[in-house]
């Protein structure tokens, strides 16, 4: 490296642009070609130039068209079906409004810091999850592969839910809605109501029998449900078309898929507030039960919800962030997206309980009417005395308050005989306490409520179109978490990989559209992601904070953001978040051990759900899902640890990246003897800064014809390593 600072400029055809502070040099005394290399510094203001000046070679890595498009993509990925059908259930179950306190605390402790961490590493290294963790530590490169496996497992069954929503959407264009009434069965002598429907309800019957045509157990396959198979195919075609060009195609769709659900939620909220009983539902929802808030289970479920609501560990956050400019304020993005996610959950909770309050009010009115008729019969039969009924009570138009007054009087007077009278207490709170979540909320409870709406087909179309868009937004991020790392690592064409991925996922997904498919969805939902993702995020935290170094990471953030992040993140990343994640992992393992592994099977004869334990082969599948998801981590570690891959190949994974330099990793490396830029020591070398450009051409050496961030995409030009494969894995 020349010691003087004279800048020599030569007009060369294939000059390579590189950042002066990002130049990584492996100075070898025997390398004459490297000593003859010449540098030219171009002081241009804060421009991230990724193409050669005067050439047509463009950076291969695409970029977001605008900051809004990127934010909508992150919001679309993080805001999913769980915000609509999981958060309201947890809020109701765990103390109403009091549940918001542990949720917010844990959002600040693990949610925002870990979300910020993933955004920062993706933006800094500009790779997918595999490339990011290979860069941090090749031995921990399996973290990226584990994220891809989990994303694939989740995508398999998540798109099935989108298929279900598409089916209901297609059936909503008729009046009355097909799940409004129980079907009639005709035989030679008379017509009667379908017994299975009569024992349950019209919406429950339609979901289990008409939509799923469900079998009575996991072992009873029952063959394919062709209606759902077609819907699943349509869902995968939509995902494939949207993702085939990467963010260039999916980014434009985000404007609709991310914003439309908010339009629908606001319309439902306004309409719901105008319905009778909606205020009762919202009041019941936000009435705090402070004593429940102190239970450890509440904090565990809040932590789990925070963790999965933001999509941590999937790789989608890293993939989306990798298409950003390096000077993007990812701290602002992390806080903004996290709170948009939180307020979306609160908005969805308001909508859900406004509608469920309306539904509970209708059920309560029916209860009052039916039990009032019973009281009249008992009065006529002489089982009850007319004297105990207040004079102002009119049974022909009795209110819920009047009925409860009569009910309390009869209960006191006929205390010993009361149970034999068969009267029920008609309290709207009792109906609201019947917590429902997941498919039970979306396809049964909510659909039943919408049948009582004026213009119910319109609201049904809007609701299920909203579910489709929520699901697609999350699917885009999930598929991006698979496609981007593989494209970055193995340099395959994105279009071909996307089509192959969607085809393979569709054919594997056929197990979810059998008549027993709903039970497989439950199995994958319970076992394929929870523990593996927790382990992945714990390892991510360790990799960045312990192996890469938190001080170095904080300096990188300062270089990227232009300011030093708060020390709050330093202590969260180093101490608090790892501890909370470990506690959550232990609590999840304990909870999984205490809960008997099984599923709720729908029994046609009784028209009720019945808990079944998984058969032996089912338990093997459950364990295999968890093992396969986390298996890449130890495999890659052992491959690197035992040098099973030839490091002399010069692969990306066999290169150690350090600030200001690049070194090969020989087996017997003793210390760092590499020369640094301008002969500085590691501590003196400044962090990468992308405001200056270097043009380098080596005399007598092959030309590296790839622009920075094109083939390698991380801002480092690997000199004297032509045609280097991206990874040996």
Image (cartoon, helix red, strand yellow):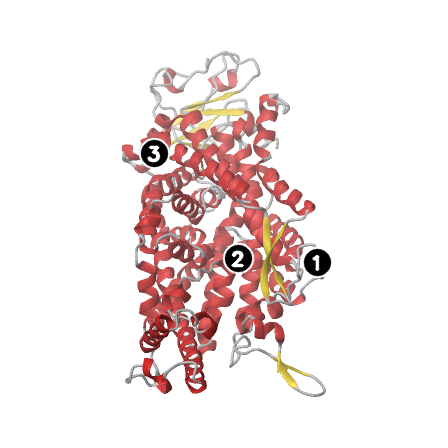
| Residue 242, label in figure | 2
Residue 145 position in % (x across, y down): 56, 37
| Residue 572, label in figure | 3
Residue 710 position in % (x across, y down): 50, 39
Q: Secondary structure at mark 3?
A: helix
Residue 218 position in % (x across, y down): 66, 55
At label 3, counting other C-alpha atoms closer than 10 Å, the crowd grade (few under 14, some 14-19, many 20 or more) is some
Q: Is residue 548 above or below residue 465?
A: above
In the rendered structure, the answer to whether residue 262 lies left or right of residue 619 reads left
Q: Are marks 3 and 2 in contact (CB under 8 Å)?
A: no
The tag earlier along the polypeptide, 3 or 2, is 2
Q: Nearer the viewer, residue 669 or 167?
A: 167
Q: Nearer the viewer, residue 196 or 206?
A: 196
C-alpha gap between disc 1 and disc 2: 32 Å
Q: Check the picture and name the quadrant holding the C terminus.
A: top right
At label 2, counting other C-alpha atoms closer than 10 Å, the crowd grade (few under 14, some 14-19, many 20 or more) is many
Residue 573 position in % (x across, y down): 37, 33
The tag earlier along the polypeptide, 1 or 2, is 1
Label 3 vs label 2, nearer the camera: 3
Q: Is residue 203 above or below residue 343?
A: below
Label 1 vs label 3, nearer the camera: 1
Q: Check the picture and name the quadrant holding the N terminus.
A: top left
| Residue 221, label in figure | 1
- Quadrant of res 260: bottom left
Q: Nearer the viewer, residue 113 or 593?
A: 593
């Amino acid at each position: 490296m020349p010691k003087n600072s004279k800048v020599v400029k030569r007009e060369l055809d294939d000059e390579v642009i590189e950042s002066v502070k990002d130049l990584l040099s492996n100075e070898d005394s025997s390398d004459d070609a490297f000593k003859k290399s010449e540098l030219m510094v171009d002081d241009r203001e804060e421009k991230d130039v990724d193409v050669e000046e005067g050439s047509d070679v463009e950076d291969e890595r695409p970029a977001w068209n605008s900051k809004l498009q990127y934010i909508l993509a992150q919001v679309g990925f993080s805001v999913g079906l769980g915000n609509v059908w999981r958060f309201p259930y947890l809020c109701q179950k765990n103390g109403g409004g009091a549940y918001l306190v542990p949720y917010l605390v844990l959002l600040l402790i693990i949610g925002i810091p870990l979300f910020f961490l993933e955004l920062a590493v993706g933006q800094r290294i500009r790779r997918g999850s595999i490339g990011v963790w290979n860069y941090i530590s090749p031995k921990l490169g399996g973290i990226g592969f584990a994220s891809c496996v989990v994303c694939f497992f989740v995508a398999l069954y998540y798109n099935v839910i989108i298929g279900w929503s598409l089916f209901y959407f297609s059936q909503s264009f008729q009046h009355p809605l097909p799940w409004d009434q129980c079907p009639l069965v005709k035989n030679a002598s008379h017509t009667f109501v379908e017994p299975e429907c009569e024992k349950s309800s019209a919406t429950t019957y339609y979901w289990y029998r008409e939509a799923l045509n469900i079998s009575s157990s996991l072992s009873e396959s029952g063959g394919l449900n062709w209606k759902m198979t077609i819907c699943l195919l349509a869902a995968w075609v939509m995902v494939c078309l949207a993702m085939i060009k990467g963010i260039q195609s999916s980014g434009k769709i985000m404007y609709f898929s991310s914003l439309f659900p908010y339009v629908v939620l606001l319309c439902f909220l306004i309409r719901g507030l105008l319905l009778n009983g909606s205020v009762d539902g919202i009041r019941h929802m936000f009435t705090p039960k402070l004593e429940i808030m102190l239970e450890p289970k509440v904090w565990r479920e809040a932590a789990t919800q925070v963790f999965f609501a933001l999509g941590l560990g999937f790789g989608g956050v890293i993939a989306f962030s990798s298409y950003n400019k390096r000077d993007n304020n990812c701290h602002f993005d992390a806080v903004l997206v996290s709170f948009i996610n939180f307020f979306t959950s609160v908005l969805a909770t308001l909508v859900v309980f406004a509608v469920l309050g309306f539904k509970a009010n209708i059920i309560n009115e029916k209860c009052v009417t039916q039990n009032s008729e019973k009281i009249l019969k008992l009065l006529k039969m002489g089982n009850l005395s007319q004297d105990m009924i207040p004079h102002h009570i009119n049974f022909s138009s009795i209110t819920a308050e009047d009925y409860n007054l009569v009910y309390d009087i009869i209960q006191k007077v006929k205390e010993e005989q009361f149970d034999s009278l068969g009267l029920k207490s008609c309290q709207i709170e009792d109906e609201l306490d019947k917590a429902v979540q997941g498919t039970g909320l979306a396809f049964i409870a909510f659909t039943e409520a919408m049948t009582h709406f004026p213009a119910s087909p319109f609201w049904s179309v809007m609701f299920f179109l909203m579910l489709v868009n929520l699901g697609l937004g999350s699917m885009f991020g999930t598929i991006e978490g698979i496609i981007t790392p593989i494209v970055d690592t193995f340099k395959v064409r994105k279009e071909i990989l996307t089509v192959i991925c969607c085809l393979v996922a569709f054919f594997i997904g056929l197990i979810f559209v059998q008549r027993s498919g709903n039970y497989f969805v439950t199995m994958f939902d319970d076992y394929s992601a929870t523990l593996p993702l927790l382990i992945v995020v714990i390892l991510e935290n360790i990799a960045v904070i312990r192996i890469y170094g938190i001080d170095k990471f904080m300096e990188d953030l300062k270089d990227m953001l232009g300011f030093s992040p708060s020390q709050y993140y330093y202590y969260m990343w180093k101490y608090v978040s790892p501890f909370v994640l470990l506690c959550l992992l232990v609590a999840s393992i304990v909870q999984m051990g205490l809960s008997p592994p099984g599923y709720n099977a729908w029994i046609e004869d009784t028209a009720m759900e019945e808990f079944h334990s998984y058969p032996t082969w089912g338990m093997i599948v459950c364990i295999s899902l968890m093992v396969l998801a986390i298996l890449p981590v130890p495999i890659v570690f052992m491959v690197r640890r035992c040098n099973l891959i030839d490091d002399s190949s010069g692969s990306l994974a066999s290169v150690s990246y350090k600030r200001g330099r690049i070194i090969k990793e020989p087996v017997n490396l003793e210390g760092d003897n590499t020369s640094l830029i301008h002969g500085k020591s590691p501590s003196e070398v400044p962090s990468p800064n992308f405001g200056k450009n270097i043009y380098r051409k080596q005399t007598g050496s092959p030309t590296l014809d790839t622009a920075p961030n094109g083939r390698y995409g991380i801002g480092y030009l690997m000199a004297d390593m032509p045609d280097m494969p991206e990874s040996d894995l």
